[in-house]
Image: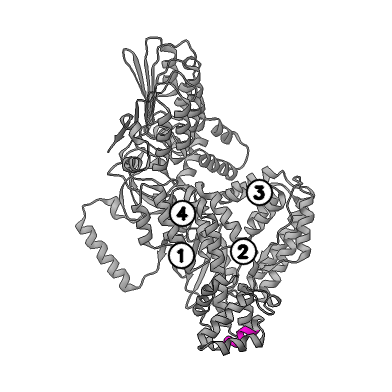
Amino acid sequence: MILEQLIDVLNLLKRCDFPQTRWHELGLTLGLHKNTLDNIKRDSNTTYEYLIECLSQWLSRADNVDSKGGATFDSLSDALKSMNENAAADKLDQEKRKAKAIDIFSTHHPLLSQSLSDPVNVAIMLQREGIITGQVLASVESASPSVPNQREVLLAAIIVAIQSKYSLLQTFASVLCKFTGNVKLGTVIQRDNDKVFNDAAQVISDDEAQESSEFSSSDSNKSIPSVAPLYIPQYKSEDFDVLYAKFAKMFSNVRKVISQSPPPLEELKTFIEDFNFDLEAELSLIKNQESVMRLIRKNCSLINIVILEAVVEHFEIHNAQIYIYDYKREIKEFCRNLSVDLCLNEPFDVVRTSPPLKCETATYVLGWEATEHKLKDVTDIVSKSSGKFVKLINIKSTQSITITCSFPHSLTEALIIKLSDNLELLKKNDLMELTVGYCTIWKKQKIQEIQESLEEEVQEIKEQDKDHDKVNKPIAKSVFIARYGYYVIDSVDISFSEGEWLEIYRKDDSFYWKGRSLVSGDEGDIPSSCVYSMLESLQLLEFILSVEEVSLPILQKIRNDSSSNDKKASYFLKTINDDPIMISALRQDKEQHDKGVTGSVDWGFDRVSLTSPSPVQCNEVISSINNNFKEILLHSSSTNSTITILSSTKLSTLNLRTVRRFEIWLTPLTNDCIQYLCILITNNRTIQELDINGHSISDRGVSNICQALEHSSTLTSLDLYHNPLITSTSGQALSHLLLNNSSLVELNLTETSLSAESILLILQSLSNNKNIRILKLDERHEETCINTYPNYHLIQDRVDWWGY
């Protein structure tokens, strides 16, 4: 610190309640000479003036200040502690940490203000996590659709939050990591936060660090940086210290065995990602085996080593299995003998980690006496009701016991379903309350509360019509999770955020379902392509395993795989995660299969329209079509039929010279379908109009189509109307298309989820493309674009704003 910070130091000591009358002793402790302090007393009049001059001399590093550590936060804190001003020293340490957290945030603020994506949905999660208030959230939302303004409001609120509690920086970083577009930002902030604040943790022994170093030298990747220390939590109980020592010994032995014949790095990372998809971001940054082992260790607990066990089993590392077997036997004995009251407030993690977010935390409140139960009772009830992916964090007790667990955020839906199925088991064990994330699954009510609730429900039923679906409470199979955030496109829609829980109570239409948000309570139409359910996903897997034929190569691979059904399920879940539109495609396939839909083919004078066609009907059309036809329309097609049409050699050759327009409507195009479509539009030199409408394409499809069209000299019209899975991610691809394509005359981007920021990027490219005569955009972005884009007046005649 320097002299210019004098007023800051004075204010800091005021906030820390330091008694000014002890200024003389403080000066001596900081390294000032007695003569210096006597002169201060002689030349000043009040105690406050004495303190000011004392601190001024200290900041100027007079006398022996440097020998006492210099003018720093740490030396001031040490001085206060040596004077037994512990309360003031503790407050000073908090202020120091707060200042460091703000420094970290300030370092990353410029990049956050430019690159933070989806600020509204980030704000919604931050509000649920208790970092910002509902008023701040409303301010962020009201700044819409200007993304820079939304960022500015949100980041200003984050600074205020960190100033009140420095640990909220870590929570902010964890929230960022839940959003694909913000993972890198969140990871870098987490890294810097760990570097600064890990100093308070206990470091493992030098021997173990050396073992890590030896392991890294045997890695196939030789360019590994020096080994960073591992941190472990502080245990209060000797029993936990003993168990941790056994864990450390077991893990060290297993690591040595793995180091002797390590699995291929990419295969190991892929397996762990399949095991826990939430680790994808961390795995993407890992470059060596040692870092993988650190990640495995971090995701173990004293009584849950399932991830380590799975790796050893999958890669058949037989020599390591004996160490795991012995440790599991010791865990079992430990849990059987240890009373719950001896486990209270003890951390079960084996490395120091940040607390999980609320959205990845499950809490059981049981009406148990801690002295009357063993730890095994806790582990049994958790494992039987939740499964092996839930990790015990801690146990607390007042009049009851509260068991807090963490789980992978991606398994939220599966956990809710499993807990709902096991609710009776939990009730028999005196369950008082059960929460998962932000949602209370069940709560034991007092008789009076139950009566009041029943009276309210009876009155509500009397006032409503006999809409049975709306009266019923949501059940597990009706609860879906938003894979993507959605902003209202039509007046009957509802907006929701990524990760939000939604109750679906009617599915009258394949692509729009009736439902309500379990967060906001809003009711209306929900685009089905934006939501998913783990239960439904597994039902779709059962469907593709049971039908006679599937055309998609990736699904054929899963069907023909000789692995167990569990592994097939893992591959399938990864597949639908990689291809956002796959779920919509399979839903349509299953619906048409279950209903026995018979497709139709409508032959016009110069057009042919296929609606829900079978592959046989598609082949008949392909064989019958001739040079008289100018339009092909494909509506509500299954994946098998879509592949049949798009992979046709006849359509992609130059022989079919008259087809001018190709329309695809309500036909979800998977990655494989998109590849065939790209080949078709690249090889066919006659198609001038391409319409892909109605929930038929996602960002990845848009990116591939744009690349295929960049150098096209044929296509004049591209219509992407009504595709909610076209998000801000597509902005860059569409912008490049306008910069490189010279044939397009009309582009329709209405009723998509493109952000205002993406639209501005597209408008900039439009300024350089003089061939586009009509660019159709959503009216909700009009005001922002007109007020933000300085050259809008040069292109305004070519932009057509569409309302709803």
Mark on residue 417?
A: 4
Which tag is nearer the camera, tag 4 or tag 1?
A: 1
Find residue 246 and report its horizontal and vertical position in percent. Answer: 72, 66
CA distance separating discs 3 and 4: 33 Å
Residue for badge 3? 286
The tag earlier along the polypeptide, 2 or 1, is 1
Residue projecting furthest to the front? 43
CA distance separating discs 2 and 1: 19 Å
Residue located 53% across and 43% down the image: 573
**Secondary-structure class at tag 3:** loop
Which tag is nearer the camera, tag 3 or tag 1?
A: 1
Magenta stretch: give its range: 22-28
The answer to which image quadrant residue 153 occupies is bottom left
Which amino acid, by three-letter code, is at mark 1? Answer: Ala
Q: Is residue 444 magenta?
A: no
Which amino acid, by three-letter code, is at mark 3? Answer: Ile
CA distance separating discs 3 and 2: 21 Å
The answer to which image quadrant residue 251 occupies is bottom right
Find residue 267 and report its horizontal and vertical position in percent. Answer: 67, 43
